[in-house]
Amino acid sequence: MNKRLLIAAYVVSDWLSGAMSWTVLYVFRKVVFEETTAIEWSDAFADSQYLLGLAIVPVFWLILHGIAGMFARPLKRHRILEVGQVTWTTALGVLVLFFGLLLDDNIKSYRQYYASLSALTACHLTLTLLGRFIITTRTVKKIHSGQWSFPTLVIGGNERAVRMYEEISGLHKNSGYRFIGFIQVNGVDTALDSYMPNLGGVPQIQQVIKDHGIEEVIIAIGGDDRNNLESILNGLEGTPVEIRIIPDIYDILSGSVRMTSIYGAPLIEIDRQIMPQWQRSIKRMLDWSVSIFALIVLSPVFAMIGILIKATSEGPVFYLQERIGRHGKPFKIIKFRSMYVNAEVHGPQLSKDNDPRITPVGKFLRKSRLDEFPQFLNVLLGDMSLVGPRPERAHFIAQIMARAPHYHHLQKVHPGITSWGQVKYGYAQNVDEMIQRLRFDLIYIENMSIALDIKILLYTVLTVLRGRGK
């Protein structure tokens, strides 16, 4: 199975439905409202308005479907999901097209407007559902027949795991799980040995997933192993797998968990998506648009800051430092240099009040947060977001993790130029303040939304204008 080809099939189908629905609307209006004769059709299809719509409208639908997440997880789509998503995207998209392209058109009455709106809605909904149903039905049949499957790892080797394996294997229709092996949790339970190979213990989870191309993980642990759940989930953090768990231990989970029955397997799916797909898409578009706008508009300010830095201290204008980003991936953060060269010759140190390593210009830059502005480039590169937990260096992360192991939850999301913790505390002067700031960043992650991001951005702008940073 090729996920890219499947996504391409959905894209082509959606483009064709968008183009065909626009064409049907055009023909409908020509026949019903303008009473165009057959002799005039050759000229009608050369109409600039029709051609412009044919170029714009299908692309508009693709963008809208992408924002709605309709090209994500192509192998896990089903017909009920298609009906729901196609219905609401059609309703939204038709309204946008109506007010954007049709409202100023030369139609003589409101009846014609309503007729056009109804024709576009019915045609697009029907054609889009038809195309997607064909692709989705084919995918589901291939999975149920066993032609397509997902490499699956079981965590736990007790009797509970055996019952789960036998139940899934005994289903009339293939569930899509292709069991590769199991991970031993407590070193004792090996009831699955006769069904699949033992691939190691909890510390080897990430390596096993990488070596075997695991796509699905089923956690099947007993009550005595519940204290291992956190270490199991920590081991799965940053891996591209989908996690499911046997319903009996549903009560020990917290956060966004929903019951699901994927291809007939009664398991609980742990939803690791902190924000809905449409909000994640809007957040990313907001990141790009604001960053591009800021880099263009603030370029004179950047030039002035660069001149001041070069004129008042030796060294480069920009300072690149390795930080740890999403899923523990290191990247180079870009900042205006606010310290003297070789300020950390004796090793990593956090800044503090009246820090002699900070230049006079650097004090102003830190107070106003202007030293962070070059990080708009990090946002465009995909390493950061506008709003998110501030990225730290590996040296300090090790110290934080020793006292607050839940720090790793911050790495579920992209780090940000600003954060709730940054608004509250500014630059942390010690590990204690980092841990205090951690509370606010964890609360942010649990409540992530576009509205909260905008609120934090407004507070950050006020901090910059008032010069109240530290």
Image (cartoon, rainbow, N blue to C red):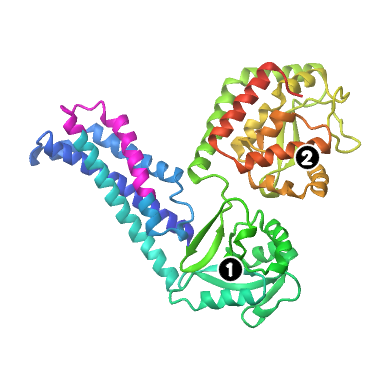
Q: Residues within 10 Å of mark 2 (few under 14, many from 20)?
A: some
79 over 357 or under it: above or below: below
Residue farthest toward the bottom in the current orientation of the protein: 194
Please indicate, yes or no, whether residue 246 appears anywhere in the rendered image: no
The amino acid on which the numbered mark 1 sits, given as a three-letter code, is: Thr
Can residue 298 be seen here? The reply is: yes
* Place of residue 94 in the rendered image (x, y in percent of width and height, measured from the top left): 31, 38
The percent position of residue 10, horizontal first and vertical second, equals 39, 53
Quadrant hosting residue 237: bottom right
Quarter of the image for residue 414 reads top right
Out of 417 and 78, give the one closest to the viewer: 78
* Residue lying at the far front of the rendered structure: 251
Identify the disc placed on residue 152. 1
Badge 1 marks a residue whose secondary structure is: strand
- At a point 84% along the width and 25% down the height, the residue shown is 340
Residue range of the region highlighted in magenta in the rendering: 85-113
Q: Which label number is shown at residue 435?
A: 2
